[in-house]
Amino acid sequence: MKLKDLGEFNFIDRITPGCNAGDPSHVVQGIGDDAAITTHAEGVQLVTTDLLIERVHFIRGTISPRQLGYKSLAVNLSDIAAMGGTPHDAYVSIAIPPEVPVEELDAIYDGMKDLARASDVNLLGGDTTSSRQDLCINIVVIGSAPHDEVLLRSGARVGDRIVVTGTLGDSAGGLAILLSDPDIPADVAAALLRAHYEPEMYLEEARLFAASGVVHAAIDLSDGLASDLRHICQKSGVGAVVDVASIPTSSELRILCGTTGADPVQLALAGGEDYRLLVTIDPVGFDGLRRGIARATGRELYDVGTIVSEPGIRLQAPGGGLTPLSISGWDHFTSTTTEPEQEDDAS
């Protein structure tokens, strides 16, 4: 079905069922009026927004519509997690080219709703409009955190452990598969592509971090370890030493690199879109927090280095030598497109 045959308001009616996927107790008015109305008394309000544009952030045909919807919401939920917050409500604005089938849009919203249900988040409105050429999705997420439990980039302290919540470089590995189609086992390719398209969320860990009192700074790994750790160091007025041997990489990424000749550590440092959390933790409280996270979530924390007073980031080689980290991660205005180009009429 074509969107022009359905019309804007029928399309809104079509996607509305299932949007109230989270706690409805604070929702006074959702989709169906000029604005949504909610009430919050949990503490400070957190607001984040991310924009995904076709041919810049994704290429239709290389990502399924459901995955596109999932990822569009995931990148925003990850920002709330990086602040130690709890997401509540999302507002979706979408600009739609005329040739996009309604069924594809249904699948995009199905992906959003799947993640919204898993994350206890309501989809409460936004805007729909036409686009002359490219599909654009912008989502705003509203969250909250207790007044004294907000995590910032600026709180890192000398001596803190630098910790990440999962393996790094997998999303970059998925992108490498899209770019070059290497000869690797199908299950390996599937795992790396899933990491690229459907990043894991760390909302439960985020709240445990914020409530622990021993996590001093946090950021989500959207642009790569090198870039995002540099943000924390600059905001906090500190430096960092990263232990190369401690950087966690998956067996799937190492298999890929064994075939392509790429360095998994370089992908872990410079590859973006892993959406793990990077936190700095008081060393006295690190072991206890690590055990608590494991009990609560079944997930592991990876200690990759130390915050130091000397500015800049240095890599510690297995032999003990230190070298300055010169590479950086993704930059939206200096880096090339994240996805392989293909014909504009891909669907």
Image (cartoon, rainbow, N blue to C red):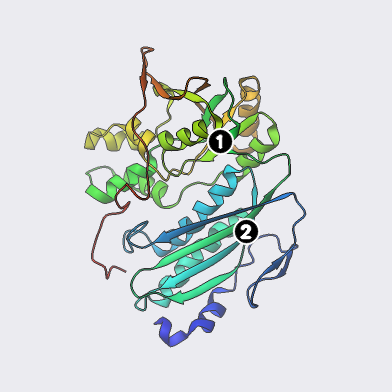
Can residue 94 be spotted in the picture? yes
Mark 1 or mark 2: whose residue is earlier in sequence: 2
Near-viewer residue (3 or 45): 45
Say what secondary structure mark 2 lies in. loop
Tell me if 189 is positioned left or right of 313 in this view.
left
- In which quadrant of the rendered image does the C terminus lie? bottom left
Disc 1 packing (10 Å; few <14; some 14–19; many ≥20): some
Near-viewer residue (45 or 287): 45
Q: Quadrant of residue 158?
A: top right
Above or below, comparing residue 180 to residue 293 in the picture: below
Q: Residue visible at 44% across and 43% down?
A: 274
Above or below, comparing residue 331 to residue 237 in the picture: below
Q: Position of residue 37 (x, y in %)?
A: 70, 68
| Distance of label 1 from label 2 (alpha carbons) | 22 Å
Q: Position of residue 67 (x, y in %)?
A: 43, 58
Q: Position of residue 152 (x, y in %)?
A: 60, 39
Question: At label 1, which amino acid type do we have?
Answer: Arg
Tell me if 211 is positioned left or right of 249 in this view.
right
Eye-nearest disc, 1 or 2: 2
Q: Position of residue 35 (x, y in %)?
A: 65, 72
Q: Quadrant of residue 1?
A: bottom left
Q: Residue visible at 35% across and 43% down?
A: 172
Question: At label 2, which amino acid type do we have?
Answer: Val
Near-viewer residue (94 or 115): 94
Q: Which residue is mark 2?
A: 121
Residue sitting at the far right: 41
Disc 2 packing (10 Å; few <14; some 14–19; many ≥20): many
Near-viewer residue (347 or 45): 45
Can residue 186 be spotted in the picture? no
Q: Which residue is mark 1?
A: 299
Question: Which numbered disc covers residue 278?
Answer: none
